Image: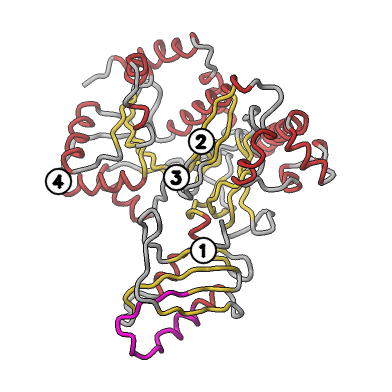
Amino acid sequence: MIDLLRPINKHIIYPLYYWKNGDKRLKRLSELEQSQYLSEEDLNQLRLERLQRIVAYAFENTVYYREIMLERGIKPVDIKQLSDIEKLPVLTKSTIQDRMEDMISSQYPREELIKDSSGGSTGEPTVYFKNIERHNLRRADQIRHDRWTGWDIGKRKALIWGAQRDLKAVQSFRENILSTYVERQWELDAFEMSDSEMSEFTHLLENLQPSMILGYANALTLYAKFLTKNKPDHNINLDGIVSSAETLTEEKRQIVEQAFKCKVLNRYGSREVGLIASECKQQSGLHINAENILLEVVDTTETAVSQGNGDILITDFWNFGMPLIRYKLGDVGKVTNSKCVCGRTLPLLGSVEGRSGDFFVSDKGDKIHGEYFTHLFYELPEVKQFQMIQESLDLITLNIVESNPIQSKDYLDKIIEKTKNMLGQNIQITPNFVKEIKPTATGKLLFTISKVNK
Ligand SMILES: [Zn+2]
């Protein structure tokens, strides 16, 4: 069926609507479409200018950044190359909570800023502010990366998403018109995914024929499994899928790609800074949204790692309302030095490996995913339940519920040996034989907990 509204939306409704509202997303989009193919040299020059601009602005207009720079004897002119950002300290969520008032720019009256907060899987909400221009320009970032799936303005898009749910109840008539006729975007509720709901999804998607779906990795996987089992011959014909907000393992990617018969592109973003990085159709790493943010992957000394993984820090080039410089999001990423064959010069992030709290830290500073230790307990009949906690860099507590308390403890030797091989020979491992292991306050039963890498 020919979608007559598509060209009308792309060439008339969409541009007219945003032009009328003074929103510069399309102008910005055309700049981004070009800058992604700049020579590396030109791209780096553009990024350096933007970094210098936000650092100078923060120094001039916020109490916090002026204070921390003066304390270190740094002036904005000391930022002569991108890596000079390492002269500034890392910004943690707790610093934002403590110093928020001092981080807000003196150029902006509070009522001109948008207040927002991020929940995050760590459970501690971070309140922050952004200027409205930054907020609107983010849309251009998203459109550029969405187009990598084959979708384009004018084509329909479906979201399997839950974050909007609280808004949905109060969505006005105007907002409905906006999402249906301007954005051409339909939301499916990721919080309600029973079999009957998923049958409804299928019915809706077959009727709508969207070009792309954007969804949580786990919701997409759940739905893909449902389709494979109940309607493998569905008539949903997508250009591509974007998976976001949760870790997309290769196994999940395969399940979704096979069910929908199209590529699944992984994306990484956060509420505070928007789109951070996403895959193109080559799927060989995530292109960083490099004209708009600076992404660093750093070790425990807050300097760049040249290989392997580390903590992700983000500097937002455009949030003048409340500058975020070297902001530690709490995620661990892996660097890569390879280049993508698609021709875009936007640098690559190898992968996003999980939340910082999921990782144990060795005496050399290497980060090892908790999953490694979980595997040590596979097929051990002696252990009914376990929980490994890294209390500090040199101490591990190992809670064990044994199948039979009078059995030999020989099985422990291997676990201790393999743990020491990963974390360092000097680490102390204290076994604790307990009757039960209780779930956390949120009801999750955690097998591994790291207290050293928050
Ligand atoms: Zn590429």
* Residue sitting at x 38%, y 54%: 250
The type of residue carrying mark 4 is: Asn
The span shown in magenta is 398-418
Which label belongs to residue 261? Answer: none
Q: Which one is nearer the viewer's eye here, 126 or 55?
A: 126
Q: Is 270 rendered above or below residue 104? A: below
Query: At which x and y percent is residue 399?
Result: 43, 74
Specify which label sits upstream in the sequence, 1 or 3: 3
User: Which of the two labelled residues, at mark 3 and mark 2, occupies the earlier sequence position?
Assistant: 2
With respect to residue 55, does 86 lie above or below? Answer: below
What residue is shown at x 60% (from left), y 69% (from top)? 393
Disc with the residue nearer the chain's start (4 vs 2): 2
Residue 79: x and y, percent?
78, 40
Residue type at tag 2:
Ser
Q: Is residue 415 visible?
A: yes
Q: Which quarter of the rendered picture does the C terminus lie within?
A: bottom right
Tell me which label, 1 or 2, sits earlier in the chain: 2
* Mark pair 1, 2: CA separation: 25 Å
User: Which residue is identified by label 1?
Assistant: 450
Distance CA(mark 3)–CA(mark 4)? 30 Å
Q: Earlier in the sequence, mark 4 or mark 1?
A: 4
Contact, mark 3 vs mark 4 (Cβ under 8 Å): no
Give the secondary structure at mark 2. strand
Instruction: Respond yes or no on whether mark 3 lies under 8 Å from ligand 1.
Output: yes
SS for tag 1? strand
Tag 1: Cα neighbours inside 10 Å, few (<14), some, or many (≥20)?
many
Residue shown at the point (72%, 44%) measured from the top left: 85
Name the mark on residue 117. 2
Report the residue at 44% width, 45% height from top.
Answer: 282
To which residue does mark 4 refer?
Answer: 230
